[in-house]
Image (tube, rainbow, N blue to C red):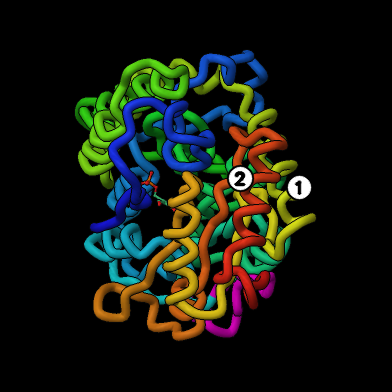
Amino acid sequence: MTYALPREIGPREIGPREIGPREIGSEFHWDPAALTAGGDDWLPPVSQLFATGCGALTALLRHLRPRGRLHVPSYFCMGVAEALSAEIPIAWYRHLPDRGGPRWETLRAGPGDLVLAQNLFGRDRGEPWNDWMAAHPAVTVIEDHSHDPLSGWARNSRAAFAVASLRKTLPVPDGGLLWSPRGAELPRPAGAESEGAHLKLAGMLLKSAWLDGRPVAKDDFRGLQQRGEHTLLGNAGPVSAFTAAVLPLLDAAGLRQRGIENARALAAEVPVTAGPFRAQLICADQQRRDDLVRHLAAHRIYAPVHWRQDRGGVWSGDDEAADLAARMLTVPVDHRCSPADVRRVAAVLLAAPETVGAGIA
Ligand SMILES: Cc1ncc(COP(=O)(O)O)c(C=O)c1O
């Protein structure tokens, strides 16, 4: 399985202040201010915490031992799909980031099959899936709520299983939450905690010091983050003690709300589709998208791409999905941004020639 941290292009940086404006996006740092004991009521009462979302899915597949295939949305993380394809034959159905939702006619699941349903960028609704599940009781649906673990859909899910990779939205080094809204038996994580979580936590702590102006080299915490992510990749072991301890104390709802407000504020100025999972922009073509990612990085705004689809490797076979994947980027306006940060992102985007002709899905 191969998926990488967003690349960051720039000079070797020792401290944030000598260089210019605050960086926006990239990996979360550790911020104790996020610990408000803000309420753990979103955490399912019965769940298992794995090191990663992919590991949780792998463990679930091994536990269920399905006879059939796993149906995966065509706009999805190809690295995760590739990892799951080692466990079970995969089929694709069309689900694009275009508000059209899953194209049900392409989802040809039969009895004994499993379906991965995703709340893409947090913008889908649960009702159509509830109807589909009611009409297909012999198919097991696993919902992926990684982009919005606190959505109404996630909290009121009726699926057999649901999963969320937590470090995509919350400032924790690892964590793949698995639960069964229907109360089905869950697999347990096996083995020891991943060293990857420790490396990532070290990276988060050093980044925090760097943001405070301490003499920390950016390369050093980036190296820890990358090694950590690499080590963590697909791990089906238990979540780290750190993440397990802080999760119930995090102001997850407050972080979510701030992210949503920031994405909306950006959308008021720039043609992006807003939140709940940050904001997405579609460029006219791949060249302009890649140039825009570089342009933003030169302004210390680190925009990830969700998700590249390489037609030469594992890909969905859905040309429309691959085309969108080649043109989209995620604008990293999450809970960390201040109003001034959002205004700066908007100004940089509006001044970029690559933004001309960009639009929303
Ligand atoms: C939508 C989605 N689901 C699941 C995963 C897997 O999560 P993890 O990185 O924790 O294995 C990812 C990872 O990129 C993802 O983007």
Q: Nearer the viewer, residue 160 or 84?
A: 84
Q: Amino acid at mark 2?
A: Val
What number of labels is visible? 2
Predominant secondary structure in magenta?
loop
Q: Of the two numbered discs 2 and 1 on the same chain, state the one appearing first in sequence.
A: 1
Q: Is residue 62 left or right of residue 308?
A: left
Residue found at x 60% / y 65%: 281
Start-end of magenta stretch: 95-109
Q: Position of residue 80 (x, y in %)?
A: 34, 58
Residue assigned mark 1? 265
Q: Is residue 316 left or right of residue 320?
A: left
Q: Amino acid at mark 1?
A: Ala
Residue 106 belongs to the span the image colors magenta: yes
Q: In this view of the protein, can residue 105 be seen by the observer? A: yes
User: Where residue 231 is drawn, which disc sits there?
Assistant: none
Residue 163 belongs to the span the image colors magenta: no
Residue found at x 58% / y 84%: 105
Q: Position of residue 322 (x, y in %)?
A: 44, 78
Estimate how packed mark 2 is, as few (under 14), some (14 to 19) or many (20 or more) residues with alpha carbons within 10 Å. many
- For label 2, the SS is loop
Residue found at x 36% / y 44%: 56
Residue assigned mark 2? 333
Estimate how packed mark 1 is, as few (under 14), some (14 to 19) or many (20 or more) residues with alpha carbons within 10 Å. some
Quadrant location of the C terminus?
bottom right
Q: In this view of the protein, can residue 74 be seen by the observer? A: no
Residues at badges 2 and 1 in contact (C-beta under 8 Å)?
yes
